[in-house]
Amino acid sequence: MGTHIFFPSSSNHSPYTLQSTEKQRRASKEDLSGLTAEEKVERRKVRARMYNRLSRRRREQLHGDLRSDVKRMRIYKDIVDDAPDMMCVISPDIQSQVLYINKAVRKVLHTEPMRLVGSSFWDIVHADDKAALFKALTAVTIFKSARKVEPVRCRILTTYPGVFVSVRMTLAYGMQGIVCVLRHEDPLPAILRVSL
């Protein structure tokens, strides 16, 4: 069976119309009136096998594409997990719940990532820096990606009570929440340098 290109006479057509027109064209092309009942059944079986093969090929292609997408996503996750800067995703609501945080939190805050996931981001922000951070988070949430929000400097609580690390936060609105990149620019407190 050869490949035919079908051009409808109307220029304003929907894909659905094209598909149904293609089916009508295929159905009208094959005349089964001169065949016996067994021959008609056999023809239909041949056609069904052909469509099953095409469907199987499409499914295999889809699965291959999906596998490569998952592999690519794993690579991106590995890159983010191993990045030297702390990266986290927080919910865009008033609680600012930590949804994800990378492994760099071990080096900077001396805590495990899973210990912070699910907790409020406000619990680790210094009280004097909460107003500036709240303003920046509100701007990111309201304007989404339409406006660039200036990085915010704030202090983040470490595992050691009363010991804060000064960081520069860059904020961006993402599909899963607010993406924060935290880079410590000042030298780490002595207690953190000793335990590294």
Image (cartoon, grey):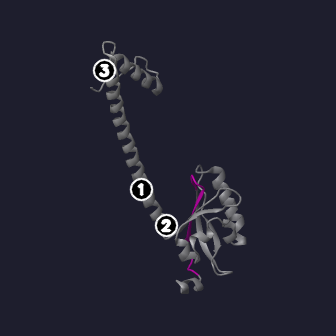
Q: Position of residue 97 (x, y in %)?
A: 66, 62
Tag 2 residue: 81
Q: Position of residue 106 (x, y in %)?
A: 55, 75
Q: Is residue 189 magenta?
A: no
Residue at point 72%, 65% (across, down): 131
Q: Residues within 10 Å of mark 3 (few under 14, many from 20)?
A: few
Q: Position of residue 100 (x, y in %)?
A: 57, 63
Closer to the chain start, of discs 1 and 3, is: 3
Q: Residues within 10 Å of mark 2 (few under 14, many from 20)?
A: some
Say which mark, if any, is on residue 72.
Answer: 1
Distance from label 1 to label 3 (Cα)?
Answer: 50 Å
Task: Find numbered disc 1 in the image and state the secondary structure of the residue it sits on.
Answer: helix
Tag 3 residue: 39
| Direction from residue 145 to residue 4 in the image, left or right | left
Outermost residue on the top side: it is 34
Say which mark, if any, is on residue 115.
Answer: none
As shown in the figure, which amino acid type bears the numbered disc 3?
Glu
Q: Is residue 84 visible?
A: yes
Tell me where the magenta segment starts and ends, as one range. 173-188
Task: Find numbered disc 2 in the image and state the secondary structure of the residue it sits on.
Answer: helix
Quarter where residue 25 is shown: top left
As shown in the figure, which amino acid type bears the numbered disc 2?
Asp
Residue at point 57%, 83% (across, down): 192
